[in-house]
Image (cartoon, helix red, strand yellow):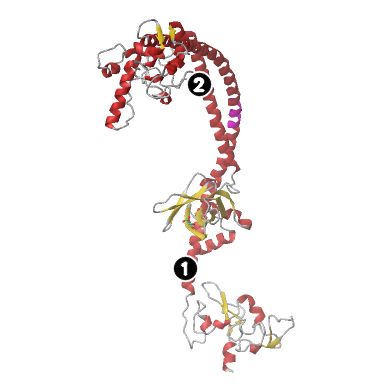
Amino acid sequence: MLWTVLFSIFITSCNGVIERPRGVPPSKASSYQPNAEQSFTCLSTPDGSVVSIPFIYVNDDYCDCEDGSDEPGTAACENSRFYCENKGYKGEYILSSRVNDGICDCCDGSDEYSGDKIQCGNMCIQLGLKQREELLASKKLREAGYKVKQEYMQKGKIARDEKQSRLKQVEQEQEEMINERTELEAKKKEVEEPEKVAKDVHEAAWNEQKAQKEKEKEHSHALQVFDELDVNDDDHVDVHEMRTHEEFDVDSDGTVSHDEAKEYLEDLEKAGKDEFLEKIWPNIKEIYKSAKQEAEDKGDKEGENQEGDSEEPSTTETTVSPPPETAGHPSPPGTPPLTPPVDFDDIEEGHHEEDDEIDDDDDDDDDRVDHFPATEEKKDEDVMPEYDEETKRLIEAADAARQKYDDVDKKVRDIENEISGLKKYLETDFGPEQEFAFLENQCFEYSDREYTYKLCPFNRASQRPKVGGTETSLGLWGHWEGSGDNKYSAQKYERGQNCWNGPDRSVKILFQCGSENAILSASEPSRCEYQFEFATPAVCKPLSLDEEKSELHDEL
Ligand code: MAN
């Protein structure tokens, strides 16, 4: 009976608020008023029927209503809830089973009212103060952040307008430039045609001159070889004379047979000068070796054999070597030449110092044939003569036209690049008020123990090990990914580097209001799927009227 009285204590208010049983929130006070019959009606029943109990059964530590509504202030009903008033902080429900269990659950200590297990102090004022401080700080942050966001919005809109008008301007410029380029291209072609004709004429003349010189050189070389072969000076080259040259030893048996010599002599026993020039010379010109060269070749071979090394010939090598295929194994008549014809003019006129240095044997009779001039330096006569004045003038005019065309062509390409950049910008969704545009062209980093993460908003995200290793792409700008009305609260970067045996890497960015832009955290909730928390003023919302009012109240 004493318990019944205890548990039925009504919480009364000194300022006229309706009295209510323990554990009942003010919002439900009216349901806990005794009626004329001094009874209480259970707040709900499973079948909707009305169940009333004497009012004194409320909080009598015995569960009468199925919904537990008759025992808000005791632990009697399993399914009942106790309301902590928590004045100065925030009211909250706890499970009724926690009432008088010896643990302080409500900050005002009202759940441990029996006092026989524990005495709870009142922590609500302290908690309330802390909460108010936090609330105030968060409101201040939002206020400050929203101010910055407004600047972002303004700047973003200005930037967008500027880009739009710049696009119009450059598209117009592009059209003009393309027209100008077309005109310059026509002009260029116009002056390039006579330039080409004049250059071709000049070059053809030069090639002809070169060919003629070659021919002359070869003719004189052939005459020289004729003289060398004609040992008996009878104005003929005969089989015997041919047989003294081992390069005509086709089968490499150590002797030049009569037949081998005759084969080169086109089946003749001997050939006079004209016949030699016309028929024999073409057969032997690639393989013929003067006596001196042969001696030198022999000397070289012996030297090589003695030293037993096979160094590359030095660049100052001056002897005429047969083509690799024919070295020591003369080609039969009719074999096409494998090396270009010897430039005899060079030999005759090339009194290069290098030649003189190498040639220390004091006999210059065979030098003309056996020595090439140094090939590195081009002699004046190998260089095409300058163009005539008229051709030079045509080239100059064509160069100028080409330059003008190239300049405008470059401008067209620069404009094309600028247009594609502007279009890309204008196609990007920087938020409904352009508030995220400010983040474009910036990059932010965040380091944890292992990696440094990088985010360049609207562009890309990456990861780099802090020690060694290379950067891994975590993804390229994809789309906004906030749910429902909150589309602009999250972003997705996708198509990053493929994860071994897994997906392509990707990152979700979760935005939250902050006074500055920064990555707050980076994590990998699932392998190769990353998540960054990013603070930015761009998502700060303005205070609601209620919040502004309560702030005023707080400040007062
Ligand atoms: C790298 C990093 C990690 C990732 C593994 C997957 O080490 O990109 O974040 O989990 O590769 O193999």
Q: Which residue is mark 1?
A: 130
Q: Point out residue 528 in the picture as x, y percentages from the top left corner.
A: 52, 56
Residue linked to disc 2? 403
Q: Main SS type for the magenta part?
A: helix
Relative vertical location of residue 527 with respect to residue 361 in this rendering, above or below: below
Q: Residue at x 51, y 87 (%)?
A: 114
User: Residue 143: which numbered mark, if any?
Assistant: none
Q: Residue 316 sits in which quadrant?
A: top left
Q: Is residue 327 left or right of residue 458?
A: left
Question: In the picture, which quadrant includes the N terminus?
Answer: bottom right
Q: CA distance from mark 1 to mark 2?
A: 75 Å
The structure residue drawn at horizontal position 67% and vertical position 84%, both measured from the top left corner, is: 66
Q: Secondary structure at mark 2?
A: helix
Q: Nearer the viewer, residue 309 or 151?
A: 309
Nearer to the camera, 546 or 229: 229
Check disc 1 and report its element: helix, strand or loop.
helix
- Between residues 355 and 504, which one lies in front from this camera angle? 355
Q: Residues within 10 Å of mark 1 (few under 14, many from 20)?
A: few
Q: Residue 71 at x, y = what percent?
A: 62, 84
Q: Earlier in the sequence, mark 1 or mark 2?
A: 1
